[in-house]
Image (tube, rainbow, N blue to C red):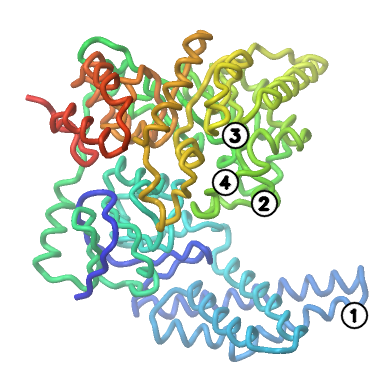
Amino acid sequence: MQRLTGIGVSPGIVSGRAVILIQREQVLRYHVPASRLDHELERLDTSRERARQQLTDIRSGVALRRGPEMASIFDAQLLMLDDEMLVSRAVEIVREQLVNAEWAIQRVFQEFSAVFDEIADPYLRERKGDVADLVGRLKMNLRPGMATPRDLLRELDEASVLIADELTPSLVAQIDWTRVRGFATDAGGRTYHSAILARSLEVPAVVGLYDASRVIQPGALVVIDGSGNEVVVNPSEELLARASRHSEDRAPAARPDHERRGPAMTADGVRIRLDANIEFPGDLASARYAGAEGVGLFRSEFLLAGIKSQAVSADEDAQYEIYRSMLEGMAPGMVTVRTFDVDEDQLARPMADGWVADAERAGRQGLRGLRLSLVRPELFGVQLRALLRAARHGNLRIMFPFVSAVEQIREGRRMVEEAAAELARRGEPPVHVPIGVMIEIPAAAYTADLIAREVDFFTIGTNDLIQYCLAVDRADARVSDMYEPLHPAVLRMIVMTRRAAVRRRIPVSLCGEMASDPALLALLVGLGLTEFSMTPSAIPKARQMLADIRAEDFRALVRRIIGLPTAQDIERELEAALGGLVMGGNVKRRT
């Protein structure tokens, strides 16, 4: 029995066979039973023959267009296919370690890389690129039509636990948690996006393990104890029995429709609007089932990244159909679409299903969001025209992300007007669509009174707002404990933004992981906010908690704590006010 200690970020204890996900290499490593060994080896051989045919075709095409000298570049790759150090070595790894073919190919590439890195000759050292190209082709051929770990996870045959170097929120939100019982990651902290999402999904999780993805072998029996801050490899029978009891207890009971539908309300009659954050039109069903009144945030860039054809970003009709289906699916509820929030690097390369590590996404502060859209008018214009056309089919709002100055908003609105004029010239005059901004940069919060004059609504994006306010990369385990939603500066910026919206009489909502935490939601109600957007699975708990608190009580609490100097002081006051109503993210009914 081996114990690995980390940070328990979502309570509960579960067991299962380990599936290893190495996100940086975009490959899964899992155990292959002896009964399926021949099938796995056959997959490898099929992949090699496909690669041989593909490379032969490519070589012939290059020879016709550029001559035999250029075509000879691919001779080396064709020879590698029969080299004992490549596919034959992968076969050996599959046989000896009983692992999947994708991982075996990746392991061979790692061995090749180590050899090439020691070569002094620059020309020979650069040939590693040929190996990488061939390895990528072999992995692609192993899973035709499956480009992402999300696709691969659907193939798991038994209840498993996921062990990863790191895990993106988009992947967490789409995993079938009836088959994957819990997860553990090398990276992360308590405020890691995926950790917060795990709590709302009630999925046991431990993060900050540093090397679990390397230490734990695929297929090993593992217990993830989110309450005890540990992962146990080859656990005792007693621990397995305890995990089994927890798995049986955590099956959710169906809730009556009247508990899911209708507006949320506090005990003293304050109406609270609860919307959903979604990434794909297919998420609408879970949002509606959870009782969301609308979509408070649709992350348009994730939807585009998930479509097989990258050309969709330049296809107005394709985008129009996507937005139309989403608006019709949520009608008559309101849908707020955030325009593309990517940066130059992400735009330059395909993002398979949002496959961007938290650590890679965090800290992107340059040419991103609306800033990038303004310097890519052809891309932005396509999206705006598609949105304006779709607005006829539902209740749409357009939101600009990563705004830091009034002039950016004015330029963005000018481009909306240009898109509307273009549609009118085509005989498709658009309907009016409210334009708003996400307040997620301190500069925007401090000038919220000026920005409010330029827009129709505000959405406070707490995830980035906290990060940039406190200069903390939330995916960096070394400082993740400093990512503190209750920091006095964060609360003051929220208050400042709300006041600016109220004075200008424009709607203001809060969209971020703060809203998914029942305790923090109660405090936000005390700050005067009444509109929130969160992951769909968090909505039922939010509704339940709101019904048990009095908004007036928390407004009084805010008046007491707004001057406190530390987040710890504020947290103690909040816990005392809740009186045990919310414990560790779980809502306790008052009796």
Mark 1 neighbour class, 10 Å CA radius: few under 14, some 14 to 19, many 20 or more = few
Kindly identify the amino acid type of the residue bearing the numbered disc 1.
Glu
- Kindly state the secondary structure of the residue where label 2 is placed: helix
Q: Point out the tag, 1 or 2, that comes first from the N-terminus.
A: 1
Q: Which residue is mark 2?
A: 345
The Cα atoms of the two marked residues, 3 and 2, are separated by: 16 Å
The tag earlier along the polypeptide, 1 or 3, is 1
In this rendering, which labeled residue sits more in front, label 3 or label 4? Answer: 3
Quadrant of the rendered structure where residue 156 is?
bottom left
Location of the C terminus by quadrant is: top left
Label 1 SS: helix
Looking at the image, is mark 1 or mark 2 nearer the viewer?
A: 2
- Which circle, 1 or 3, is nearer the viewer? 3
Residue 550 is left or right of residue 50, and the answer is left
Q: Look at 47% across and 23% down and name the residue there.
A: 330
**SS for callout 4:** loop
**Residues under labels 1 and 3: Cα distance?**
49 Å
Q: Amino acid at mark 2?
A: Asp
Mark 4 highlights which residue?
306
Q: In the image, residue 201 lies at what x, y percent?
A: 31, 42
Q: Provide the secondary structure element on which disc 3 rests.
A: loop
The picture quadrant where one finds residue 75 is bottom right
| Tag 1–tag 4 contact (CB < 8 Å) | no
Q: Residue at x 41, y 76 (%)?
A: 99
Q: Is residue 322 visible?
A: no
State the residue at coordinates (28%, 26%). Answer: 561
Residue 402, numbered label:
3
